[in-house]
């Protein structure tokens, strides 16, 4: 893990959402625990899925003929539970610094859930928001980040991805992006990134002639 990000500049920054921009962990835990209890699934089977689309989790945990109903139910639970979702430290300063530059969100949420959480946290929405509804393959596949870069009109290799989850970082590396990880949900030793910090209050984004640097 090398801190060479300060020596580089980027055409765009692509942020993960849950755990990176907003703290939705209490709501996520409540929703999935309710879902698991309703279906008789042991709580321990919910471990290790952070950053993975709900459809992939549901497909792994329920019989094929039950996937549609089970996915509809977890979507209903999550969209309906946004009471205590808040913006994480440093996020609003980062967004303010990036005004006029290219930046996006690429999330494993559905569009409805992303809109609900962005609204609940009162987070300004960037020019591009890519959700699981916009791609065929979610994280850890690189498609979410490749799609975000394409919609921004930039080369993925000229993008910095900000993530909190190992699966998301895997997707970013596969897309050819540089990586900045925050330890908001995962210990630093489990995050394979170009730079790992506690949260976005530990870095500063600067924009010069449309190019973005991280200090």
Image (tube, grey):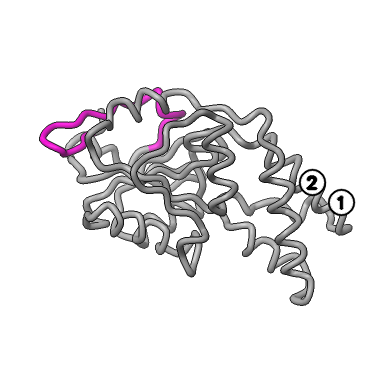
Residue 168 higher or lower than 194, as above or below: below
Task: Give the image quarter of residue 148.
Answer: bottom left
Query: Pointers 2 and 1 in contact (CB under 8 A)?
Result: yes
SS for callout 1: helix
Confirm whether residue 187 shows in the render: no
Instruction: Tell me if residue 199 is in the magenta stretch.
Output: yes
Indicate left or right for 117 with 202 as reference: right
Q: Residue at x 50, y 27 (%)?
A: 88
x and y percentages locating residue 191 in the rendered image: 47, 45
The N terminus is located in which quarter? top left
Q: Is residue 132 left or right of residue 85?
A: left
Query: In this view, which residue lies farthest toward the bottom?
Result: 65
Q: Which residue is mark 2?
A: 33
| 199 with respect to 213 (left or right) | right
Q: Is residue 154 left or right of residue 96?
A: left
Residue at disc 2, secondary structure: helix
Measuring from the top left, give residue 86's x and y in whole percent. 57, 27
Q: Which residue is mark 1?
A: 37
Whole-percent x and y of residue 130?
A: 43, 53
Region of the chain picked out in magenta, as a range:
196-213
Per the image, is 138 magenta? no
């Amino acid at each position: 893990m090398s801190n060479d990000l300060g020596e580089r500049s980027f055409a765009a920054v692509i942020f993960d959402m849950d755990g990176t921009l907003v703290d939705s962990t209490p709501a996520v835990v409540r929703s999935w625990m309710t879902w698991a209890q309703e279906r008789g699934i042991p709580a321990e089977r919910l471990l290790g899925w952070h950053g993975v689309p709900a459809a992939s989790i549901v497909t792994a945990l329920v019989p094929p003929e039950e996937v549609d109903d089970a996915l509809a139910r977890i979507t209903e639970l999550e969209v309906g539970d946004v009471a205590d979702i808040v913006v994480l430290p440093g996020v609003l300063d980062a967004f303010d610094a990036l005004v006029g530059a290219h930046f996006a969100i690429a999330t494993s949420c559905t569009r409805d859930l992303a809109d609900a959480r962005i609204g609940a946290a009162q987070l300004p929405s960037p020019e591009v928001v890519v959700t699981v509804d916009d791609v065929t393959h979610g994280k850890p596949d690189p498609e979410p980040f490749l799609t975000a870069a394409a919609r921004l009109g930039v080369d993925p290799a000229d993008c910095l991805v900000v993530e909190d989850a190992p699966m998301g970082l895997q997707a970013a590396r596969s897309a050819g992006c540089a990586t900045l990880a925050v330890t908001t949900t995962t210990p630093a030793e489990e995050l394979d990134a170009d730079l790992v910090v506690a949260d976005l209050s530990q870095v500063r984004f600067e924009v010069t002639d449309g190019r973005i640097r991280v200090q």
